[in-house]
Image (cartoon, grey):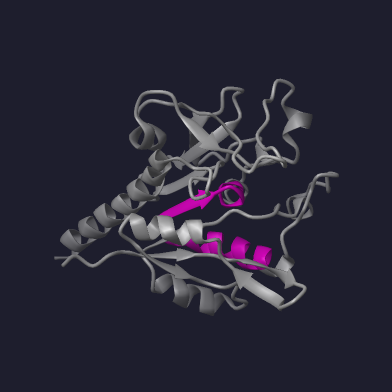
Amino acid sequence: MRRKPLIGLNMDFGKVESKGYVAELPAGYFDCLIRAQAVPVAIPPLVHRRDIEQALDAVDGFVLIGGDDLDPLRDGCYHHPTTRVMHPRREDFDRLLVKLIAERHMPVLGIGAGMQLLNVSQGGTLSLNIRDDFSNAMDHRDPHDPYHRHGLVVSPKTFAKRVYGDGEIRVASRHHMAVLDLAPIFKVSAVAPDGIIEVIESQDPDWFAIGVQYHPECEAASALDLRVFEEFVAEVVRRQSAMQRAVA
């Protein structure tokens, strides 16, 4: 029986009134990985670099989950009135984590804030509020509708095309920030109908790195969105097999 790949997941972190500080993970992330034939491994916000490196030694790939906003001050920007920053302990961990993932060329899938983190970690920038930077922007979130969705326009010969194929595509959208300047290592794989970047992928053949701005793991996602996880896990397995053949 083939060994299933181990896929790491970071966790959200914050204070809950009745429990104190907690690290938590929405079930959609690990349930989608389980359905994609992977074994999810949740990793709390570790403090020491050596501990993070040891955790990465144990997994075959990584999924960077969504959450609150990256602190714009850390990237030389300012706090917008809509900014809701994630807890500093999580952000400290996440930023070091993605740096080590990139150094290792470890397969990674970034979702929501995870995609934004991939972009800024490689020299890209973010729009702090879509409405301020894109005059023709459509709604990318609706605080009154957790099932808000919008269309997706995929580019040929990309990860997004492999996932969705042809036909009308609609994805679950919940973001007010977005990629502004794309990091040089990435290319655009799909956009929303208003042109806002929704999927990115690494142009380095040695680093399988994918980012999706929408949420294929959430309750508003479609059955087709599971293929984001299936294709990611399948590529992790392909790369594992190629490495084993090279060593043999």
Camera-side residue: 233 or 172? 172
Q: In which quarter of the image is the N terminus?
A: bottom left
- In the image as oriented, which residue stretches furthest toward the top? 136
Visible residue check, residue 104: yes
**Residue 84 location (% of width, % of height):** 77, 53
Quadrant in which the C terminus appears: bottom left
- Number of on-image labels: 0
> What percent of the width, then of the height, locates residue 102?
48, 57
Query: Residue 90's x, y, as percent?
Result: 66, 66
Compared to residue 104, the image places residue 58 above or below, namely: below
Find out whether residue 8 is within the magenta segment: no
7 over 191 or under it: above or below: below
Q: What stretch is highlighted in magenta?
A: 90-116
Residue 208 or 185: which is nearer the viewer?
208
- Please tell me whether residue 95 belongs to the stretch shown in magenta: yes
Above or below 23: residue 73: above
- Give the quadrant of residue 91: bottom right
Left/right placement of residue 60 relative to residue 221 reads left
Position of 168 with respect to 145 (left or right) is left
Identity of the residue drawn at 45% across and 65% down = 8
Q: Position of residue 34 (x, y in %)?
A: 36, 61
- The majority secondary structure of the magenta stretch comes to helix
Determine whether, in the image, residue 135 is placed left or right of residue 42: right
Could one spot residue 106 in this view of the protein?
no
Which residue is at 73% across, 51% downward?
A: 75
The residue shown at (49%, 56%) is: 28
